[in-house]
């Protein structure tokens, strides 16, 4: 009975991962230079509630089964090192409150990974249906937002869709043939976050489902709609890389070089057709700021989620009057500035433990897109999908 209840709430948790319905709480530390920053506002999402209920049910089940043989759990060396890093990172952070709440977000990755690992056979069997539901709903939102050039509004608020239009300040747009178009957000906070999520979801789906089935073809089509209408060039190129890499690896050196040149040509073409020089300038400035932040505290970093707290002190105001209140668009630079050399080394060590031949392309997608964005460690939907991948990797 408890197992069925646990699986029911695990299903609800997985189904609601793409929907960002949540309640933000604004504290003094949630503002930078008087501006509210979503990344620093503690948020309780609907999926978080389902996740906590599921964890409670599974812990209750374990206690019932092993009530007579309860042992004191002593974590291994890697876990002790990780816990020690977290403690020191919070204690010496620029803002310990922000660091503590930031590590709570990371805890969600491991909680969901633990649940997926505990129910791995069940998850593998049911994940294709869940992913199909994700992609059908996201393609619906992507299409309607693109044709309307704005959000649907109304009942869609309860699925986490934000209100926006082409005229909303800071909205993601694409310029094509001298015309401006809105990039589709679906129920995500940014089109790049949506695209990375969908690409990884598609590769997960076809790891457990054959393309020969009619539903699989429809699911693929739905995913491709999301990818195209997001206009995320880095995700497009990552998808091409992952698709052709296995074939390229088997080819002679000459054909490998042709593949590399073709990929370089497609990269250049994508940026020429859909130019965005301002975004490149801002990303470069964020990258330079992250290195300068790292040099102030090279071993432990400035504290998790403290990048934005320290950013105003390292922003090149002389060259850019407008400050970009976003994390650096590179996972490794983000870890380096927030958790220092110790955090980056532990990350590499952890990746070496989980990346295997069977899951290589899942992690390749995460790491390749992570070279150009931060959403795998900052946005709730991507964080939780990362937890699913981690759980399946053990």
Image: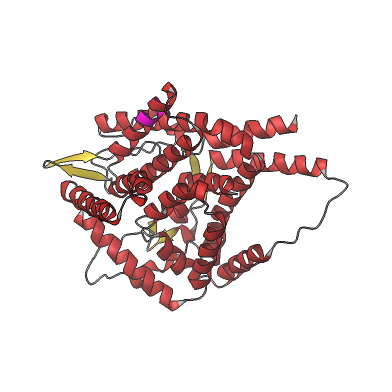
Left or right for 181, reference 135:
left
Residue pushed farthest left? 178
Which corner quadrant of the image does residue 175 belong to? top left
Q: Is residue 203 magenta?
A: no
* 274 and 252: which is toward the camera: 252
Tell me which segment is drawn in magenta. 218-222
Q: Position of residue 305 (x, y in %)?
A: 48, 61
Tell me if residue 153 comes above or below residue 323 in the rendering: above
The majority secondary structure of the magenta stretch comes to helix
| Residue at screen point 56% across, 48% down | 393
Residue pushed farthest right? 68
| Residue at screen point 59% across, 51% down | 110
Q: Position of residue 89 (x, y in %)?
A: 56, 69
Q: Position of residue 232 (x, y in %)?
A: 30, 45
Q: Is residue 219 magenta?
A: yes
Tell me if residue 265 comes above or below residue 149 in the rendering: below
Which corner quadrant of the image does residue 227 belong to? top left
Residue pushed farthest top? 214
């Amino acid at each position: 009975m408890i197992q069925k209840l646990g699986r029911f709430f695990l299903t609800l948790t997985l189904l609601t991962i793409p929907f960002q319905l949540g309640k933000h709480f604004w504290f003094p530390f949630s503002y930078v230079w008087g501006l509210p920053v979503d990344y620093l506002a503690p948020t309780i999402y609907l999926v978080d509630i389902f996740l906590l209920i599921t964890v409670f049910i599974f812990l209750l089940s374990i206690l019932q089964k092993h009530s007579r043989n309860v042992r004191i759990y002593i974590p291994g060396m890697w876990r002790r090192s990780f816990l020690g890093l977290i403690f020191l990172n919070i204690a010496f952070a620029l803002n310990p409150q922000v660091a503590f709440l930031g590590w709570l977000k990371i805890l969600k990755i491991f909680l969901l990974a633990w649940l997926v690992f505990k129910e791995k056979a069940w998850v593998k069997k049911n994940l294709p249906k869940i992913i199909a539901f994700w992609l059908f709903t996201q393609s619906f939102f992507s299409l309607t937002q693109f044709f309307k050039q704005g959000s649907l509004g109304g009942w869609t608020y309860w699925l986490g869709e934000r209100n926006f239009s082409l005229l909303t300040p800071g909205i993601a747009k694409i310029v094509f043939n001298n015309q401006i178009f809105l990039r589709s957000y679906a129920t995500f906070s940014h089109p790049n976050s949506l695209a990375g999520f969908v690409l990884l979801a598609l590769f997960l789906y076809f790891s457990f489902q054959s393309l020969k089935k009619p539903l699989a073809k429809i699911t693929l089509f739905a995913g491709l709609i999301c990818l195209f209408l997001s206009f995320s060039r880095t995700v497009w190129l990552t998808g091409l890389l992952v698709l052709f890499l296995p074939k390229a690896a088997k080819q002679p050196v000459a054909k490998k070089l042709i593949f590399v040149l073709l990929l370089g040509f497609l990269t250049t073409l994508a940026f020429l057709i859909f130019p965005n020089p301002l975004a490149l300038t801002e990303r470069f400035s964020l990258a330079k700021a992250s290195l300068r932040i790292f040099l102030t505290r090279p071993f432990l970093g400035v504290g998790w989620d403290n990048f934005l707290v320290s950013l105003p002190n390292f922003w090149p105001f002389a060259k850019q009057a407008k400050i970009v209140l976003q994390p650096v668009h590179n996972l490794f630079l983000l870890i380096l500035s927030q958790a220092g050399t110790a955090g980056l080394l532990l990350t590499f060590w952890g990746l070496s433990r989980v990346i295997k031949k069977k899951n290589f392309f899942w992690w390749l997608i995460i790491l390749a897109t992570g070279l150009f964005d931060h959403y795998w460690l900052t946005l709730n939907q991507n964080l939780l999908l990362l937890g699913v991948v981690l759980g399946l990797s053990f």
